[in-house]
Image (cartoon, coloured by chain):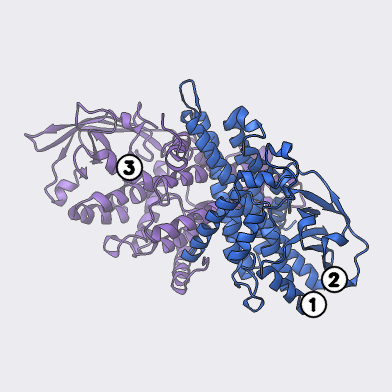
Amino acid sequence: MRFALTEEQIEFRAVVRGLLADTCGPDELRAAWPDAELAGGGPGGGNGRVPGAWSALAEMGVLGIMVPEANGGLEMTQEDLVPLLIEAGWAALPDPVSATAGVAVTLLAQATDSEKRAGELLAGIAAGELSFGCAFLAGRVATSNFVPAATSLDQILLCVNDQVHVVGPASLPLERVQSVDGARDLFRIDLVDQLDNSTVLLTGEAAESATRSAFDFAALGAAAELIGLSRRMLEMTVLYATERKQFGVQIGSFQAVKHHLTNASLAVEFAEPLVLRAANSLALGNPQASVHVSMAKAKASAAAKAAAAASLQVHGAIGYTVEYDLHLYMKRSWALAGEFGDVEFHRRRVSDELLAI
Amino acid sequence: MDLTWSESEEAFRTEARSWLESNVPTPALPSGDTKEGFALHLDWEHRLAADNWSVVSWPKAFGGRDASLWEWLIFEEEYYRVGGPQRVTQNGIFLLAPTIFEFGTPAQQEYYLPRMSSAVDLWCQGWSEPNAGSDLAAVRSKATRDDAAGGWRLSGQKTWTTRGAFCNYLFGLFRTDPESERHKGMTYFMVPLEGDGVTVRGFGRLDGDEGFAEVFFDDLFIPDDDGTAATMARGGILGEVNQGWGVAMATTSSERGLTLRSPGRFQATATRLVELAREQVGNGLSEQMADAVADAWMDAEAYSLFTLSDVSGVVEGKAMGARSSYNKIFWSELDVRLHEVALDLLGPSAELDGPWMKGYQFALSGPIYAGTNEIQRNIVAERVLGLPRK
């Protein structure tokens, strides 16, 4: 029994943390927003990507962390990737790290019918040349048909009932929609009927099973990012409450403020172990993995909403502006809390399992 | 990350389970917080001790099994899984013993620990006073030096002393430096509750049991330690005179942290909650209640995993420190939630005397004792998050 990261995982995480602090600060984040006014600054015209951070992660091998060595990857597991996604969340990196390194690799690794094509795509991921999005359009998982930064991606995986397709964005009817979080530069993909056999990657039971595990990873990836986002918001807020004075004292000395922040922190600290356990369960193919993912996503979503609410309240009016950085992280939390199954969806998956309804 | 148990840990589990399954009394014992119930629980404690299951993580020399922290967690899981009785000896075992291990002389350890593990001496905690609750440093009970007689004379009042009416010893803080204020000038005493100079009056708790006591000291004499059993039986001092606050803090951090509340208890409660809800599936269980059950279950899982992560750190030599305040807030509020959901499931029958209403009233004490959760939240905010004290 040892429920802790290894020395190597801790070191890898520290390197990624440093790298993201350098390449994905609030300025780079604002530059990913298409609309400078909504972002509260920046050049405008962004496409939901932070190219400096993405290429640095690619160079480090983060994108191919789960890709088999035979395809040029590091052949590590969900346990190694999830702590890094917590860091991606801390930086609010909008790029598709979870979708590419986690969801796409999960799907492609199971595409034994189209082994050659899948192998090429996996090699492309490991080489840092390909970025992926993923949409779940119909089936037994929660419908998730929003794809961030879709036009910037190389490939989009579509899970539709018992089929998985891999399609370039130019061949898809993408409808641009406005996310509360502009850095997501969001597109909706509605159920497409013009898919033909040329794009099919998986069919039948294999597709359904791969879709389930891909959805599980997608939900867990979002949960991990939510943990990081929550920590970031709370760190910012503690700092602000230490600097800001009212009635002649630091506002962080008020008990009401302390208790708001402790409550949010409790939610985060007790959600994180659920996230790490789910990573372990996915890595080992534990039959309870889906339930473990649902516990993680339900609790991480709730924790992030609590952290966002407490952070805004403690910041007061300055947090209620787009010039201040908090909104960049808060809006991502709101978006991810509902993505790949919200609290209600995942809690229901848990209660169905517990109560066998 | 390795979330599996080793072969020897599994063997330990099997041994514990089989002993518990054939020894845990059925039907369950009545509450141990009444005179009659306490006596029955004492029989149970003696049975545990006879087969070395009362303090598994202690050294064998003091009645334990030298079990690792992991094995202790396993034992607790099994204990509560089969519905083992509440531990009426727990305040000694989990609060005083860690302090004796850390501050006691070898003679004190040899005298007090085996008598505690075999439930010969029964210890209650004497922290609170009428005007010193969450503000423990406001303790006013005092011990006056009597050089002529060679010892200390105790006077003052302790209150809300759990099971004080049934125990024969108390440990607590007494002010030994009359000029001192707040955290300074207190000494950690171990005190007999029988004989001249001490009066114990039991009174009813919220649930009606006589689980509380107030204890009055009037010139109770504690002789200086000469290393003999006869003297130690009359009480003594742990650590240095006037250093009691530091000695006591070692105890409270074990109370708030791992040692008092292993996850096994809450997982067992969560399992019983799920069983209660299952009885209503197809028979009026609303989605809203199913969600509430799932939510409470997830929190019990989270607490268990959080503890595994803590223990992983502790066995590698990392200190828990102020993080232990997270545990105390979480488990105590989790315990209340589990019972609230169960009472909601019971609907109109919730008010009837039964295990859930009894358990609910018991759970409500959690956010209050061992430092109220408001104090714990301040500790987290200041010492973990880094917010300013004043």
Asked if marks 2 and 1 touch (Cβ < 8 Å), the reply is yes
Mark 1 to mark 3 CA distance (whole Å):
64 Å
Whether residue B297 is visible here, answered yes or no, is no
> Which of label 1 and label 3 is nearer to you?
1
- The residue marked by circle 2 belongs to what chain? A
User: How many C-alpha atoms fall within 10 Å of the one at disc 2: few (<14), some, or many (≥20)?
Assistant: some
The local crowd at label 1, few if under 14, some if 14 to 19, many if 20 or more residues have their Cα within 10 Å, is: few
Along the line of sight, which residue is nearer the eye, B372 or B3? B3
Q: Position of residue B55 (x, y in %)?
A: 36, 58
Toward the viewer: A30 or A122?
A: A30
The CA span between labels 2 and 1 is 9 Å
Please state which amino acid type lies under the numbered disc 1: Ser
Pointer 1 residue: A114
Q: Residue furthest top?
A: A247
Q: Is residue A164 visible?
A: yes
Residue at the (83%, 72%) spot, across then down: A204
Amino acid carrying mark 2 in the image:
Val
Any mark on residue B162, and which? none
Q: Mark 2 or mark 1, which has the lower sequence index?
A: 1
* Horizontal arrangement in the rendering, residue A326 relative to residue B3 (left or right): right
Q: Amino acid at mark 3?
A: Met
Does label 1 lie on the same chain as label 2?
yes
Quadrant in the rendering for residue B149:
top left
User: Any mark on residue B249, and which?
Assistant: 3
> In purple, which chain?
B
Chain coloured blue: A
Label 3 SS: helix
The residue lying at 49 percent from left, 59 percent from top is B77
- x and y, in percent, of residue A88 in the image: 61, 54
Of the pair B159 and B354, the residue shown nearer to us: B159
Q: Please tell me the numbered disc located at residue A200.
A: 2
